Each structure stands twice: as structure tokens, then as C-alpha cells.
Amino acid sequence: MVYISRQEHFNAAHKLYNPNWSEERNREVFGPCANANWHGHNYDLIVTVKGKPDPETGFVIDLKQLSTVIRTHVVDQVDHKNLNMDVPFMEGQLASTENLVIAFWKILQPEIERISPARLHSIKLYETPRNFVEYFGEE
């Protein structure tokens, strides 16, 4: 099995805030991430696909096609957006990095299967250089 990854980048704003809680509880749990005026991140997204290389191309997946799928179906939907307000697939969810990576999986898995026999293996999303989430499709 060969694992191949593509990295993309986007910028987005969000606020971590549970509307069922008081302002005090939100500040206690989410700290400055509950800022009423939002805050932003420079996200790095790494999508890893696994499979066997095609005997004719040597590719597990055409990285140009993978990049197009990621940009079209994810990056273009979130880049320079407010994740809480501007992104339909995040509606009704807390805009945490954990929830975001699960949403990305649900979007990318069928698109990758459409273009290649390779399978989505993992999605890693860096919110900051030191904070990231990795997801393998298990719920």
C-alpha cells in the first residue's frame, strides 16, 4: 500500500461558542476563541490517499486531479470565509477544527472515489503550527 498526500492552504475566521451556554461558560471553556468579534487562522490541510500504483502511470492518484477536487469542493468553500456564517456545510455545528475535518471527509471521500480507485486514508488540518487534528474517517 502506498500513501500519498496533497497539502492545500486556506484562511478563515470562526468563533467557538455554544449558544446554549452563558457568556461566562463560553469564556470559561473556549477562552479567547469565544471572542464576539471572531478570530482567524491560516489553515494547512493535508489529504492522504492510499492505494496501489497504476501499472501504466505509476500513480496512486493523479495529484493534479486530487488538488482540483480539494480546492473545488473544500478550499473554495471555506477560504476567506467566516466558518460560522458563510459555510453551508458547517451550519448548525460548532466550528471547531474537529468538526471541520469530519465535514471535509464527508465531502472529499465520494469525490476521490469518483476520480480514482485510491481510497481516502486521512485528513490532517493544522489550525496553527502547533495545533492540528487528524481524522481517519472513524466516527
Image (cartoon, helix red, strand yellow):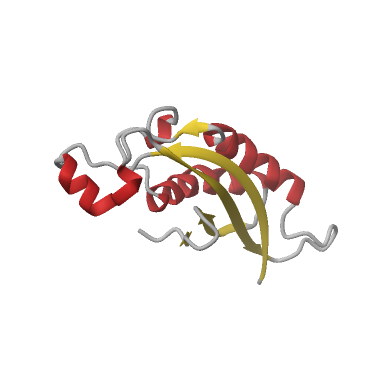
Q: Residue at x 78, y 59 (%)?
A: 59
> In the rendered view, does 72 fall on the left or right side of 14?
right
- Which image quarter holds the N terminus? bottom right
- Residue 27 locus on image (x, y percent): 23, 47
> In the rendered view, does 29 fall on the left or right side of 91?
left
> In the rendered view, does 78 fall on the left or right side of 86?
right
> In the rendered view, does 61 fall on the left or right side of 92?
right
11, 136: nearer the viewer: 11
- Which image quarter holds the C terminus? bottom left
Q: Residue at x 31, y 40 (%)?
A: 93
Image quadrant of residue 2? bottom right
Image quadrant of residue 94? top left
With respect to residue 35, does 126 lie above or below?
Answer: below
- Residue 70 locus on image (x, y percent): 62, 43
Q: How many marks?
A: 0
Residue closest to the far bottom: 1
Residue closest to the far right: 56
- Residue 61 locus on image (x, y percent): 72, 55
Q: Residue at x 72, y 44 (%)?
A: 65
- Residue 52 locus on image (x, y percent): 70, 66
Q: Residue at x 60, y 56 (%)?
A: 46
With respect to residue 104, does 56 lie above or below?
Answer: below
